[in-house]
Each structure stands twice: as C-alpha cells, then as structure tokens.
Image (cartoon, rainbow, N blue to C red):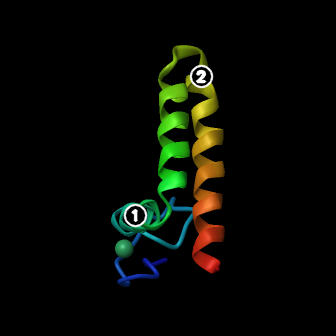
C-alpha cells in the first residue's frame, strides 16, 4: 500500500492509506480552518496526560482520526 497523497510506500502493518507526514499535515490544515476542533483536541490531549487515561488514549486517537477523515470528505 502507498500513501494516497504522494504515493510514498507505507509500512506493511499500516491500517490507513495515508502516511504519518501527510496525516499530520492534514490535521494541521484542519486545525487552521477549524479552531474549535483544535481547542477540543487540546483538551483531549490534556485529559490523555492523566495516567488513568493512558489506556483510553488509543481509543480516543482512533476516534479523533475518524472525525478528521469525515471532515475531509465534506
Ligand atoms: Zn504521505
């Protein structure tokens, strides 16, 4: 599988069709266009820093990426 943005080869265990660099860049763009999402994300990062929430982090990150992806489809 390759990155859908630039055709960069992705690691075999990748579950998305976009590389880390491009997804970071997309998130940065979305934050720029949607400051409210940035604020919400910041708050969830703060929550994740609490040790009792570390286990939850994977779920939250997955949920966040789904939100990002649904925004990109608009
Ligand atoms: Zn890429």
Give the image location of residue 9, x and y in percent: 37, 75
Task: State the image quarter where residue 2 is shown.
Answer: bottom left
Q: Which residue is mark 1?
A: 32
Q: Position of residue 30 (x, y in %)?
A: 47, 65
Nearest the viewer among 49 and 39 is: 39
Left or right side of 26 for 57:
right
User: Which residue was labeled with disc 2?
Assistant: 53
For the residues bearing labels 1 and 2, Cβ distance under 8 angstroms: no
**Is label 2's Cβ within 8 Å of ligand 1?**
no
Whether ligand 1 has any atom under 8 Å from the Cβ at mark 1 is answered as no
Above or below, 35 against 41 in this view is: below
**Where is residue 44, by image quadrant?**
top right
Q: Quadrant of ligand 1?
A: bottom left
At 44% from the left edge and 61% from the top edge, which residue is drawn? 27
Q: Position of residue 62 (x, y in %)?
A: 62, 49
Camera-near label (1 vs 2) is: 1
Crowd rating for badge 2 (residues with CA inside 10 Å; few <14, some 14–19, many 20+): few
Q: Which mark is residue 68?
A: none
Q: Earlier in the sequence, mark 1 or mark 2?
A: 1
Q: Position of residue 34 (x, y in %)?
A: 50, 62
Relative to the observer, which residue lies in front, 68 or 4?
68
Q: Is residue 4 above or below residue 55?
A: below
Asked which quadrant contains residue 55, the reply is top right
Question: How many angstroms separate mark 1 from mark 2 (CA)?
Answer: 27 Å
The residue nearer to you, when weighing 40 against 6, is 40
Determine whether the residue tagged by mark 2 lies in a helix, strand or loop. Answer: helix
């Amino acid at each position: 599988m390759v990155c859908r943005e630039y055709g960069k080869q992705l690691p075999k265990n990748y579950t998305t069709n976009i590389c880390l660099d491009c997804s970071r860049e997309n998130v940065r763009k979305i934050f720029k266009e949607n400051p409210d999402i940035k604020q919400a994300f910041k708050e969830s990062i703060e929550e994740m820093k609490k040790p009792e929430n570390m286990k939850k982090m994977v779920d939250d990150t997955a949920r966040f990426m789904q939100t990002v992806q649904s925004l990109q489809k608009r």
